[in-house]
Image (cartoon, rainbow, N blue to C red):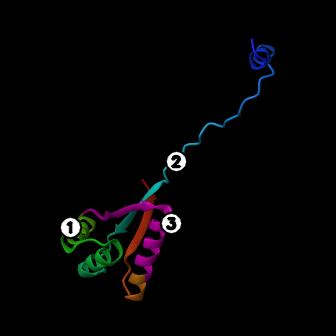
Amino acid sequence: MNDRDRRSERGTATGIATRPKEKTKRPALYKVLLLNDDFTPMEFVVHVLERFFHKAREEATRIMLHVHQRGVGVCGVYTYEVAETKVNQVVDFARQNQHPLQCTMEKE
């Protein structure tokens, strides 16, 4: 038996302490929602969807009609910071153009 084996038997062996790897969580996602109103022109809503959410004209029109018919529609799903920025951009742009369009976000 060598010295290392003897130390192991006596409980004096040295080793490397390791920490378990921490798993990185995926960030929470948030839906950006447009709310229907009776005053904002449909074409303006389509423009907002194209400009801020990079939707093609056809998809922007589909979302706009969904918002018009159902009262609310999802523009996209993003991390908190991105969703918050998009909500602020849409609301500010609507105000600058004197439209009451509302945009909100909710956790997915």
Task: Tell me, yes or no, whether the highlighted magenta stretch contains residue 81.
Answer: yes
**SS assignment at label 2:** loop
Please give the label number shown on residue 81. 3
Q: At label 3, which amino acid type do we have?
A: Glu
Q: Residues at badges 2 and 3 in contact (C-beta under 8 Å)?
A: no
Q: Residue, x 77% and y 23% (percent of image)? A: 13
Q: Residue, x 18% and y 71% (percent of image)? A: 58
Residue, far top: 1
Residue 12 appears left or right of 64: right
Q: At label 2, which amino acid type do we have?
A: Lys
Q: Residues at badges 1 and 2 in contact (C-beta under 8 Å)?
A: no
Relative image position of residue 105 (x, y in whole percent): 44, 63
Q: Quarter of the image containing the N terminus?
A: top right
Over which residues does the magenta segment extend?
70-92
| Residue nearer the viewer, 108 or 1 | 1
**SS assignment at label 1:** helix
Relative image position of residue 96 (x, y in whole percent): 41, 88
Task: Tell me, yes or no, whether the highlighted magenta stretch contains residue 31.
Answer: no
Q: Residue, x 78% and y 14% (percent of image)? A: 6
Q: Which residue is mark 2?
A: 25
